[in-house]
Amino acid sequence: MPSHDNPAGTPKCSKLPSGQHMALVRIIDANANRASEGLRVIEDFARFALDDRFLTSGYKELRHDLAQTLAAISESQRLMARETTEDVGTRISARDEYERADLAEIALVNQKRVEQALRCIEEYAKAISADMAAQIERLRYRSYTLSRAIHISHRSRRQLDGRRLYVLIDAGTSPESLAAFGRLLAQAGVHVLQLREKSLCDRELLTRARALREATRDLGTTLILNDRVDLALMADADGVHLGQADLPVKEARALLGPDRLIGVSTHSLSQACQAVLEGANYIGCGPTFPSTTKHFANFPGTDFLSEVSRQISLPAFAIGGIDAANLDEVLQAGFSRIAVSGAVTGAEDPAEIVRQFVSRLQPRVDRQSTTETQGGTAP
């Protein structure tokens, strides 16, 4: 039967003298408070600044799992060991401790605080229970994964801010024709161009990619290559798009470095969430409708778009058979970014179709401002 000094579930610290035991519990209590408080700060950033349910849930679950692990030390022991009035640390502060540039910096600083606190708990827990220390270690690694995801989500939203129309094109009949077509689309307002070509040899594809890069470089158009990380680097493209069977994000990132974009095709909410955790900069979500340029056996449709819109703040482009006739269904599902191919490349006047898409994809306030500037009224 457990004694009153060692309630059930409370690990013994028999190897430590009483004074060290109290110091140990005090250290764990202080770092437990740092970690849980820091997690709550980041959770609120994900919730209120990013409006990201998936990352908010991740941090909330981490905070709750930490509390459950720390329950191995009773609340009574922690409170008895706690001391703030005589704690020398309460009177020590860093010069810039009360200065933060923006909300993202607040989240970043607190993430570092969480990681440091978890490491302290892990080390000192080794004097209590190897199992407890191992559990804290696992929580620490989960915090690293979430930290990368929240940083990339925030950064990618800034990188792709205002980039709503993504057009996939093939290599054309020659480098010159591809460059001319790409420049036409970019001047019409396409924000992202993806070169997707499966039939050319590597040498020809690289020549086309470089021609497209030069044609669009001064127009600020983001250039993505489909599948080919190596050619994306050699053509100085802005990034690469990967399918579920292509290179993992980890391997692509190792080759591309930290600054180029990596997009991932997703066909379910679980794949979308996994892409977030793996470090993708954006996701393609679909297929939404039957397409004239690519065959699919299954169509997740607008229900999938609605799920992603509710859960994930990482930039997401709806893809698959989207055209002027069904665009409203995509917008109603919460998406303001689309990736299209045949709707533009197969049009009699591609530039005009681009302009129409861009106009309809603008946020409502932007459309209203544009209309009022032109002397009309918004619908």
Image (tube, rainbow, N blue to C red):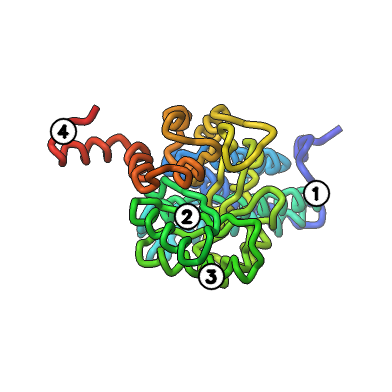
Query: Which of pointers 1 and 2 indicates the residue nearer the eye?
Result: 2
Residue 349 picture location, percent across and down: 37, 45
Find numbered disc 1 in the image and state the secondary structure of the residue it sits on.
helix
Residue drawn at the location 16% of the way across and 37% of the way down: 372
Query: Is the residue 314 above or below the residue 236 in the image?
Result: above
Residue 306 picture location, percent across and down: 52, 30
Marks 4 and 3, the one that precedes in the sequence: 3
Residue drawn at the location 62% of the way across and 49% of the way down: 277
Disc 4 marks which residue? 376
Disc 1 marks which residue? 131
Horizontal arrangement in the rendering, residue 368 relative to residue 287 (left or right): left
Amino acid type indicated by mark 3: Ala
Residue 338 picture location, percent across and down: 47, 41
Q: How many marks?
A: 4
Query: Which of pointers 1 and 4 indicates the residue nearer the eye?
Result: 4
Find numbered disc 4 in the image and state the secondary structure of the residue it sits on.
loop
Crowding at label 4, few (<14), some or many (≥20) Cα neighbours within 10 Å? few
Find numbered disc 3 in the image and state the secondary structure of the residue it sits on.
loop
- Residue 235's label in the rendered image is 3
Amino acid type indicated by mark 4: Gly
Amino acid type indicated by mark 2: Leu
Crowding at label 2, few (<14), some or many (≥20) Cα neighbours within 10 Å? many
